[in-house]
Structure formats: structure tokens, C-alpha cells
């Protein structure tokens, strides 16, 4: 499979039938034109438009814009068009706080999506809470985002704790006795994710021969990798993101380690790395899922973005998130207070990631999320059976 091309802003001009509602725009513009008194409903997006995580911001935008096309083609929210206002956080905590202040001060914005990383979202949470503006961190997997937040923090992402508990369990079930581990040495994501993995590994009898904290900004992981594989583990686990995993797995192979690599993400840099072939992860979304709703989404996505070769969980997550926010506004009203009431009442919202979304009111996350074991083959993630 050809790797995913760099998400181009010009993809937005290849719209579906509702393109007339959405004027072509850059990431810093709203996704739909509006005139004074038009009653446009605005959602904010705190995203990495520039910086090392910009590709995710572009992927989110594609999912958002496809959903906007479809929502506005059906009359928006009670006849009012929906649009997005973007602010570039670079997924940096310092920037995300400034972005939060700006959105809270913009009374037209009734909800904010983001940020990409929990590390950027969590520091901004108190600002959104004080402004009574719902922060929908649909990609935020750190449990603390909702457990330590207020009623204004919601997420449709499975938590890192659940993900890496699942990973340890799955690896053990494959007959693996020992693993070497690297994890992102970040307090708001990598360290708690590793803690969850280690606790479950200890519980099920999976030996960690060595664990090394690394930085996603590093270009040379070989010293840490050499230590991590010195004990000759049966397999290797990386707790991190796609771009760092892409560099890491290539360097892991370059030092001669050939065991199964558990890690990576369904994104362009990792999928296109030859040494990533055979990597295994638990996935929430697969474009190959035969479910009619998933295939309708994939078909619509490819029609709107003909230059994209595949669709990943990042676009699907953003697509779901926009539809969830719209459903909440329709239920509770397109105001900050109404959006919150809508989220508190939502049940069985159609989802291409989960089938349907119902929030657990205690956690403000999706009730009973599931993961599917997948393997990277020829640049495409496919389900593993058995």
C-alpha cells in the first residue's frame, strides 16, 4: 500500500454535495461561511496545526470537514449551519492554555475539541471549567483528563490504562514470557501508561527484562534500545506515538533485534516504515470493518479526499466527535449550558469507531470500549484472529 500522503489543505475543495455550505478555507479559518444574524453554531478546535504533531491536526480536520459536509447538508442544528474555529496549540501545554483563554472569551464558541495530546489538554482544563465551556478531548487517553477534571471534560478515547492493560494481557496470551520496553518519559501520558502496563504484566506473569524512558523528540534511541534488549526478551513493547515509534522500530531492527514489535499507530510515518511490518497493536477502528456504517464512512471519505489512500482512527475519531457534539446540541440546545446538558443525556449516538456511543456518567467516557488485535501488513493494519 502506498503510504498516507501528507494531509493537504487543498483536499477540502473536493467536497461532497454540501460543499456549497463550506467555503474552502485554511486551517485557521472557520469551516463554514457565516453572515451576521445567520445563527451559525461554532465549535472551537484546539489542535496542532504546526509543529511536530501537525499531521494529526490535518487528519482531524479531514474527519471534521467530512462530518460538517454531511451535517450541514441535512440542515445543521435545527436549521443553523455548523462551523469550526481553529487555533494552533502545536499540542504544547503553554500554547493550549493561551488557546483556551481565547476560546473562553469568544462567546460564539459553545464547545471546544482537543487537544491532540492529554499533556496539552489537561493544563487547559481549569480554564475551560472556569468559563463553563465543554472541553471535548476526544483523543485524550490519559485517565486524569476526566477523573481529575470537572463536568466540563469529556472524551471518547479509550484510556491508556485500559489500552496497556489489554496489551499486557494480549501479549501474555500469545505465549510470550518476557518483553523489553521503551516508553515516552512524559508525566501526563507515557509514565502513567507504562505504570498501567507494568502493573498488568506483573499480575499476569509477563516479565519485563528492562524498561527505558525515552523522548519523542529524540533521533537516536539506540543506547536505550541496547539496554532494553540486553536481556534477550521474547518481544518488544513501545508505549508511545506513531512518529517516535517509526524511528524507534527502525533502530531496533538496525541493532539486530527481530522479535515482535508491539507498538506504533495507524498514521503515515509508522505505516510507511518498512521495519514496522508485522507490528501489533490493539485498534479501536479498522477501515476494513465490513459494518455498513463504517464502509459508508470510508467510501465518503475517499470520495472527498481522492488523494488519500486510506482512512485511520484519527480521521474516524474526529468524524465521530463532530457528530457527537451535534447530537448533544440538538438534544440540549446550541449554547454552552445546552451542550453540557446534551452530553449528560446522550445515548446510542451512531459511531464508526464503536458502533454506538453512550457515555458512562461516572467517567464521562465511552461505556465499555473494545480493542481489536491488529497487525501491520504491507502498510495496512488488518485484524488478527485467534
Image (cartoon, rainbow, N blue to C red):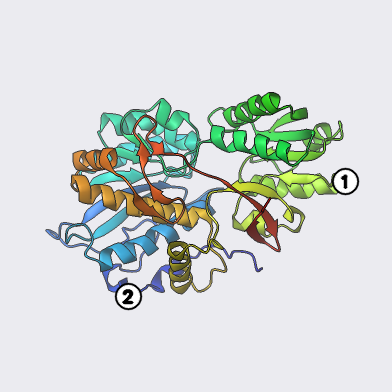
Residue at position x 68%, y 60% in the image: 272
Residue at position x 32%, y 75% in the image: 17
Which one is earlier in the sequence, the residue at label 2 or at label 1? 2
Q: Quadrant of residue 259?
A: top right
Q: Which mark is residue 303?
A: none
| Relative image position of residue 233 (x, y in whole percent) | 83, 35
85 vs 75, left or right, is: right
Residue at position x 50%, y 74% in the image: 306
SS at mark 2?
loop
125 vs 77, left or right, is: right
| Relative image position of residue 228 (x, y in whole percent) | 80, 33
133 vs 290, left or right, is: left
Q: Nearer the viewer, residue 81 or 323?
A: 323
Neighbour class for label 1 at 10 Å: few (<14), some, many (≥20)? few
Total number of numbered discs in the rendering: 2
The quadrant of the rendering that contains the N terminus is bottom right
| Relative image position of residue 244 (x, y in whole percent) | 66, 45
Q: Which mark is residue 256?
A: 1
Q: Quadrant of residue 136?
A: top left
Q: Which mark is residue 17?
A: 2
Q: CA distance from mark 2 to mark 1?
A: 52 Å
Q: Nearer the viewer, residue 368 or 114?
A: 368
As drawn, the residue found furthest toward the left would be 37
Would residue 176 be seen by someone viewing this image from the given angle? yes
Amino acid at each position: 500500500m502506498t503510504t498516507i500522503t501528507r494531509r493537504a489543505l487543498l483536499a477540502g475543495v473536493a467536497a461532497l454535495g454540501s460543499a456549497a455550505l463550506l467555503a474552502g478555507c485554511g486551517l485557521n479559518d472557520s469551516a463554514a461561511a457565516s453572515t451576521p444574524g445567520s445563527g451559525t453554531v461554532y465549535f472551537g478546535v484546539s489542535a496542532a496545526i504546526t509543529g511536530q504533531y501537525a499531521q494529526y491536526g490535518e487528519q482531524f480536520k479531514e474527519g471534521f470537514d467530512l462530518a460538517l459536509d454531511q451535517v450541514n447538508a441535512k440542515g445543521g442544528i435545527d436549521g443553523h449551519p455548523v462551523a469550526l474555529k481553529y487555533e494552533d496549540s502545536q499540542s504544547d501545554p503553554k500554547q493550549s492554555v493561551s488557546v483556551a483563554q481565547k476560546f473562553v472569551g469568544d462567546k460564539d464558541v459553545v464547545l471546544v475539541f482537543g487537544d491532540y495530546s492529554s499533556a496539552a489538554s489537561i493544563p487547559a482544563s481549569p480554564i475551560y471549567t472556569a468559563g463553563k465551556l465543554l472541553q471535548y478531548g476526544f483523543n485524550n487517553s490519559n485517565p486524569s483528563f476526566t477523573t481529575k477534571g470537572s463536568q466540563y471534560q469529556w472524551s471518547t478515547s479509550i484510556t491508556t490504562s485500559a489500552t496497556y492493560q489489554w496489551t499486557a494481557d494480549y501479549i501474555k496470551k500469545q505465549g510470550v514470557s518476557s518483553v523489553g520496553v521503551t516508553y515516552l518519559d512524559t508525566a501526563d501520558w507515557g509514565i502513567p501508561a507504562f505504570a498501567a502496563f507494568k502493573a498488568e504484566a506483573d499480575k499476569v506473569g509477563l516479565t519485563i527484562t528492562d524498561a527505558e524512558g525515552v523522548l519523542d523528540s529524540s533521533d537516536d534511541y539506540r543506547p536505550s534500545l541496547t539496554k532494553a534488549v540486553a536481556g534477550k526478551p521474547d518481544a518488544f513493547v513501545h508505549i508511545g506515538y506513531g512518529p517516535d515509534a517509526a524511528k524507534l522500530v527502525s533502530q531496533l531492527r538496525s541493532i539486530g533485534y527481530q522479535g515482535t514489535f508491539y507498538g506504533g499507530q495507524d498514521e503515515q510515518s509508522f505505516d510507511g516504515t518498512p521495519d514496522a511490518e508485522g507490528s501489533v497493536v490493539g485498534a479501536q477502528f479498522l477501515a476494513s470493518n465490513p459494518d455498513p456504517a463504517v464502509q459508508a464512512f470510508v467510501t465518503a471519505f475517499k470520495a472527498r479526499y481522492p488523494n488519500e489512500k486510506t482512512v485511520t482512527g484519527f480521521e474516524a475519531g474526529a468524524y465521530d466527535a463532530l457528530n457527537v457534539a451535534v447530537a448533544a446540541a440538538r438534544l440540549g440546545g446550541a449554547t454552552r449550558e445546552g451542550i453540557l446538558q446534551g452530553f449528560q443525556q446522550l445515548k446510542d449516538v451512531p459511531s464508526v469507531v464503536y458502533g454506538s456511543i453512550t457515555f458512562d456518567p461516572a467517567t464521562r467516557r465511552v461505556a465499555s470500549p473494545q480493542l481489536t488485535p491488529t497487525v501491520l501488513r504491507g502498510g495496512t493494519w488488518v485484524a488478527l484472529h485467534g
